[in-house]
Image (cartoon, rainbow, N blue to C red):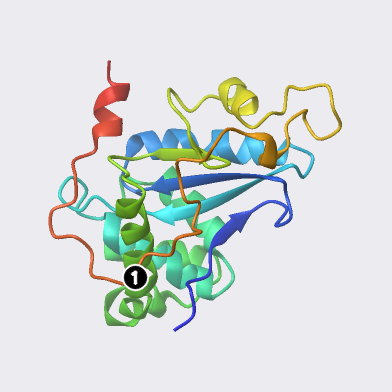
Amino acid sequence: MSDPVEHVLGNPDAPVTVLQYGDFECPYCAAAAPVLRQLVEESQGRVKLVFRHFPLADNHPHALTAALAAEAAGAQGAFWPMHDLLFARQDRLSDVALRAYAEELGLDAGRVVGEAAQQFAAKVAADFAAGLEDEVAGTPTVVVDGELFAGRVELAALRRAAGLNGSGADGGVHPGQRRQRRWSLGVRRAEREPLAEHPEEDDAEERREH
């Protein structure tokens, strides 16, 4: 079976890749989403964002169904519009709400929830497995060109991490010139395995509370 398709925002050939492991019910992911979008949009094609699902079902009971709805929307060409809606309205992620969001986007609402959405479980599971392989401990986890981004997801810090503050036309940093990578950025593809029954608690959320 072929590798699952990645969801990429921005120029697919951008020299800098920002990878996010996210959970649609995580408030810190919701706060990070517009910042990451702004980073991409203001990068002049130098940064692309890759989103992978990391639903923490123990903490967020609607995270998995929201991820499946996003994948179902993606199959209809609307992953990023649904992504934005889910984060903007993450306090309303029931099946009824997910159907309404699909209708708002002009999609087939019958495909985003229930048994019809289960066909997308393999993609969500593959993302989650890749996150476990990359030792993701919580959400959001952000990786900039193979390096774990530490600290708050703020535009200025992300711009520095992506090398966008340099004087050169390419931001002053080439991906190949960065220090040895500690993260896979998907080079190592995790096997398609079931979601863990007890994923690690959202340590990233706890760190940001202090």
Residue positioned most to the front: 180
Return the residue at label 1.
Answer: 191
In this image, 120 relative to 5: left or right?
left
> Residue 62: image x %, image y %?
25, 55
Residue found 59% across the figure and 71% down from its top: 77
Instruction: In the rendered view, tell whether residue 137 sits above or below residue 3.
Output: above
Q: Residues within 10 Å of mark 1 (few under 14, many from 20)?
A: some
Residue found 48% across the figure and 28% down from its top: 153
Residue 154 in view in this figure: yes
> Residue 104: image x %, image y %?
51, 63
In this image, 203 relative to 12: left or right?
left
Instruction: In the rendered view, tell whether residue 175 sits above or below residue 158.
Output: below
| Residue type indicated by callout 1 | Glu
> Residue 82: image x %, image y %?
49, 58
Q: Nearer the viewer, residue 132 or 23?
A: 132
Q: Nearer the viewer, residue 49 or 100?
A: 49
Residue found 29% across the figure and 40% down from its top: 138
Instruction: In the rendered view, tell whether residue 206 sits above or below residue 98.
Output: above
Residue 54 in view in this figure: no
